[in-house]
Amino acid sequence: MTLTNANDTPASLMIIDDHPLLRRGVIQLLELEDDLELVGETGDPEEGIALALKLEPDLVLLDLNMPGINGLEALRRLREANYSGRVVMFTVSDHEDDVVAALHNGADGYLLKDMEPEDMVRQLRQAALGRMVISESLTALLAEALRNQRNAPTTPDVHSLTQREREILQQLAGGLSNKLIARKLDITEGTVKVHVKHLLKKLNLRSRVEAAVWAVQAGIDH
């Protein structure tokens, strides 16, 4: 599978990870791919944030545990600074709290460092295309976390959604980004953002990833 965008150029990636050997391994892996281009790499999260905002890559691969500010804080700062690209956490941690916290704070994916190189490339391609990516071993963990949250006073009720909100929820369940949903439904990206905000509030969910997982569990993904 080859990635292309509107300008038929490779998807741009950047790595923020404090392990030089790991960065070198990812760099060498990406050098073999024509459709994924590394535009920046650093082991300093502060420098990484500044670099991401300057270069505006399509995707940032972000380590969770780093000295100084951690990956979650870096993620929050990127989102607060209106970085609109994809952010995928890349870590050794498979703890439920870390996964949920990352997704709550705006991560577009969560990949474990023990994955096979070819799987990593495949997931990065999907992320660059605007799809949500999560290591397969974490899917059940995330679903269980959502089930545990169902003890909240308000239980998600799909009947509270408008027809358009239901359509967008179905697309979220397919892992599509706002841009891809807008293109598919022939509406503006801004309109999609408004609908996503409303449906999350109605369903008492905190992130689009939670909504996607819940929709799949509830059979609303088709």
Image (tube, helix red, strand yellow):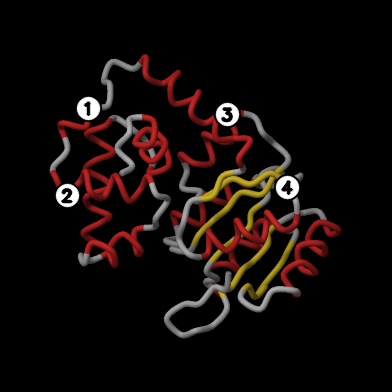
Which element is circle 4 on?
loop
Of the residues under marks 2 and 1, which one precedes in the sequence? 1
> Would you call the spot at circle 1 few (<14 residues within 10 Å), some (14-19), or many (20 or more)?
few
Of the residues under marks 4 and 3, which one precedes in the sequence? 3
How far apart are the two marked residues, 2 and 4, measured between alpha carbons? 37 Å
Q: Which residue is mark 2?
A: 164
Instruction: Name the residue type under label 4.
Output: Met
How far apart are the two marked residues, 2 and 3, measured between alpha carbons? 32 Å
Kindly identify the residue that appears in the image at 75 percent across and 56 percent down: 117
> Would you call the spot at circle 4 few (<14 residues within 10 Å), some (14-19), or many (20 or more)?
few
Residue 155: quarter of image: top left
Of the residues under marks 4 and 1, which one precedes in the sequence? 4
Instruction: Name the residue type under label 3.
Output: Asp
Q: Which mark is residue 115?
A: 4
**Residue 200 picture location, percent across and down:** 28, 38
Badge nearest the viewer, 2 or 3: 2
Kindly identify the residue that appears in the image at 65 percent across and 58 percent down: 46
How far apart are the two marked residues, 4 and 3, measured between alpha carbons? 20 Å
**Residue 76 picture location, percent across and down:** 50, 49
Residue 87 vertical position relative to residue 7 in the rendered view, above or below: above
Which element is circle 3 on?
helix
> Would you call the spot at circle 2 few (<14 residues within 10 Å), some (14-19), or many (20 or more)?
few
Instruction: Name the residue type under label 1.
Output: Asp
Which element is circle 2 on?
helix
Q: Which residue is mark 3?
A: 97
Instruction: Name the residue type under label 2.
Output: Arg
Badge nearest the viewer, 3 or 1: 1
Kindly identify the residue that appears in the image at 34 percent across and 58 percent down: 178
Q: Which residue is mark 1?
A: 157
Kindly identify the residue that appears in the image at 56 percent across and 28 percent down: 141
Contact flag, marks 4 and 3 (Cβ < 8 Å) = no
**Residue 49 picture location, percent across and down:** 59, 61
